[in-house]
Image: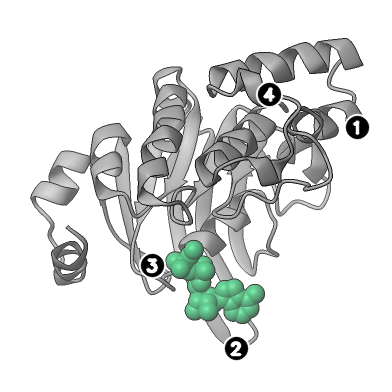
Amino acid sequence: MSKIQTIGLRKSYGPVEVLKGLDVAVAEGEVVCVIGPSGSGKSTFLRCLNKLEDITAGKVVIDGFDLTDPKVDLNKVRQHIGMVFQHFNLFPHMTVLQNIMLAPVELKKGSKAEVRANALALLDRVGLADKADARPAQLSGGQKQRVAIARALAMKPDVMLFDEATSALDPEMVGEVLQVIRDLAKEGMTMVVVTHEMGFAREVADRVVFMADGLIVEENSPEELFGNPQSSRLQDFLAKVL
Ligand code: ADP
Ligand code: MG
């Protein structure tokens, strides 16, 4: 069984069809990178995977639960899916530790002491053990994004979705965030990573999906996709970004 599966996934905003029937399957422990030009529907696709968007047609199935089935407890399924965005969306009035503890405390993922111990362990894991009491404003962009990743991990998800997690960062901070994602991949986390870091996709992805105009134009192993692109759309895209 796939960890994540979409079947004929379509999404329209009014008369504009943005996703035009996507069939994607992600196995447990697999890392799928999604690349493609701006406006091709990558973010919309990712948001459909935890139903942050209403799905116009087709299915999204997570761990066997069909999110389009009204009987499925969406909040419960969502708790298993961590999401990290381009902009970190940390609460500015809270410390780093409070930001990480908020959701697991609210959703009773353990006693406060357990949640706190887990949050501190996660901060250590992303290399920010000394920043527990700092406010987001005191952190660099790369540090904020690492906190955002720790915050998502605090819910103990078994799927992580990344939407251009490094594209708002100064270049010197990209590496530290990619390293955290790379470590997660090594630990076997199931991930869908929308990225414009082609080198990273090539290195970390088990499979790369190229989207254009709301469709999957090509998908393949990184070696094949980057080394032997079949379609002119992908060839043109790679010529611009590589
Ligand atoms: P990408 O992440 O690949 O850049 P998006 O998924 O953000 O692409 O957007 C795909 C298309 O959907 C774009 O044409 C965008 O303008 C449109 N779109 C995205 N969100 C909305 C929305 N909330 N309302 C209307 N159109 C939207
Ligand atoms: Mg996007």
Between the C-alphas of marks 4 and 1, the distance is 14 Å
Write the residue at 55% across / 85% down: 16
Q: Callout 4: few (<14), some (14-19), or many (20+) C-alpha neighbours within 10 Å?
A: some
**Residue 88 in the image: x percent, y percent?**
63, 49
Look at the picture and state if 159 lies above or below 117. Answer: below
Mark with earlier residue (3, 2): 2
In front of the other: label 3 or label 1? 1
**Residue 161 in the image: x percent, y percent?**
54, 43
Task: Identify which amino acid the numbered label 4 is placed on.
Answer: Lys
**Residue 66 visible in the shown view:** no
* Towards the viewer: 132 or 197: 132
SS state under label 4: loop
Left or right of 150: which side holds 213? left
Left or right of 43: which side holds 36? left
Q: Callout 2: few (<14), some (14-19), or many (20+) C-alpha neighbours within 10 Å?
A: few
Between the C-alphas of marks 2 and 1, the distance is 39 Å
Task: Identify which amino acid the numbered label 2 is placed on.
Answer: Pro
Between the C-alphas of marks 3 and 1, the distance is 38 Å
Give the number of the disc on residue 106.
1
Residue ID for mark 4: 156
Mark with earlier residue (4, 1): 1
Mark with earlier residue (2, 4): 2
SS state under label 1: helix
Between the C-alphas of marks 3 and 2, the distance is 17 Å
Task: Identify which amino acid the numbered label 3 is placed on.
Answer: Leu
* Towards the viewer: 211 or 174: 174
Q: Callout 3: few (<14), some (14-19), or many (20+) C-alpha neighbours within 10 Å?
A: some
